[in-house]
Amino acid sequence: MKDIEEKFPRTLWIRLIIYIAVGHVFAAFLWLLFEVGANQ
């Protein structure tokens, strides 16, 4: 595990987690738009 931590800095992990979180929120928002649009 030590080698992986040295290869990827902590800031990179934080940025990666933020990107994944934002991507999921955006995808959920789009899905919600389509669900509401299909029901109307």
Image (spheres, rainbow, N blue to C red):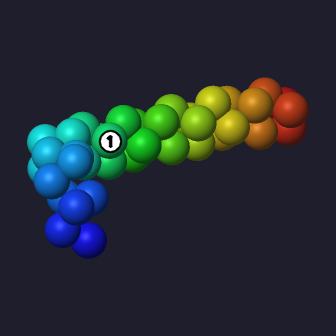
The one nearer the camera, 9 or 25, is 9
Q: Amino acid at mark 1?
A: Leu
Circle 1 Cα neighbour tier, 10 Å, few/some/many (<14 / 14–19 / ≥20) = few
Q: Is residue 31 left or right of residue 19?
A: right
Q: Nearer the viewer, residue 35 or 17?
A: 17
Q: Quadrant of residue 2?
A: bottom left
Q: Quadrant of residue 11?
A: top left
User: Which residue in the structure is indicated by mark 1?
Assistant: 16
* Left or right, 20 with reference to 7: right
Which residue is painted at 36% across and 36% down in the image?
19
Residue 25 visible, this orientation = no
Residue drawn 48% across the image and 36% down it: 23
Residue at 86%, 32% (x, y): give it: 38
Q: Position of residue 22 (x, y in %)?
A: 39, 37
- Most distant residue in the bottom direction: 1
Residue 21: x, y in percent?
39, 45
Position of residue 5 measured from the top left corner of the image (x, y, whole percent)? 19, 58
Q: Secondary structure at mark 1?
A: helix
Q: Nearer the viewer, residue 28 or 13?
A: 13
